[in-house]
Image (cartoon, rainbow, N blue to C red):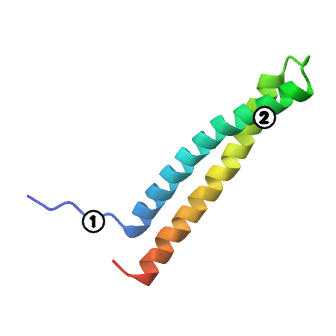
Amino acid sequence: MQTPAKTARWAKCLAISVLAGLSIGILTIAVSSFFFYRHYSAQFPADTQNLLSALTSGVLVGIGVGATAAVVTAGIYLLSGLIKPH
């Protein structure tokens, strides 16, 4: 039986950074939507679209934070490989 092929280092780095970015982005969407909704409902109590505005703002913030987290995670992974090679 053949031994399985080794996963390329860039593929591991990509998978780790995408998963980290997604998880941090989803968490950020939930938290920031809550805070945006509190702000919008305090500032505009009669507006019926506060929830939609809060979710839209939360998604935009979550995408930005998730993308930044993915890039930072990939950078840390690649730099740690340069310091002590595997």
Circle 1: residue type: Lys
Q: Quadrant of the C terminus?
A: bottom left
Residue plotted at (82% across, 24% down): 50
| Dot 1 and dot 2 residues touching (CB under 8 Å) | no
The image shows residue 37, relative to residue 27, as above or below, that is above
Q: Which residue lies furthest to the left in this view?
A: 1
The first of marks 1 and 2 along the sequence is 1
Q: Which of 15 and 4 is in front in this view?
A: 15
The percent position of residue 67, horizontal first and vertical second, equals 63, 54
From this view, report whether residue 34 is shown above or below residue 78: above
Between 30 and 22, the one nearer to me in the picture: 30
Classify mark 1: residues with Cα within 10 Å, few (<14), some (14-19) or many (20+).
few
Which SS class for mark 1? loop
Residue positioned 60% across, 57% down in the render: 69
Using the image, determine if residue 64 lies above or below residue 78. above
Query: Which label is found at residue 6?
Result: 1
Which residue is at 86% across, 16% downward?
48
The residue under the point 71% across, 32% down is 34
> At numbered mark 2, what does the secondary structure look like: helix, strand or loop?
helix
Tell me where residue 84 appears, x and y as whole percent: 39, 82
Q: Mark 2 points at which residue?
A: 36
- Would you identify the image quadrant in which residue 35 lies? top right
Along the viewing direction, whichever of 27 and 41 lies nearer the viewer: 41
* Tag in front: 1 or 2: 2
For marks 1 and 2, give the CA distance. Answer: 45 Å
Question: Total of numbered circles in the picture?
Answer: 2
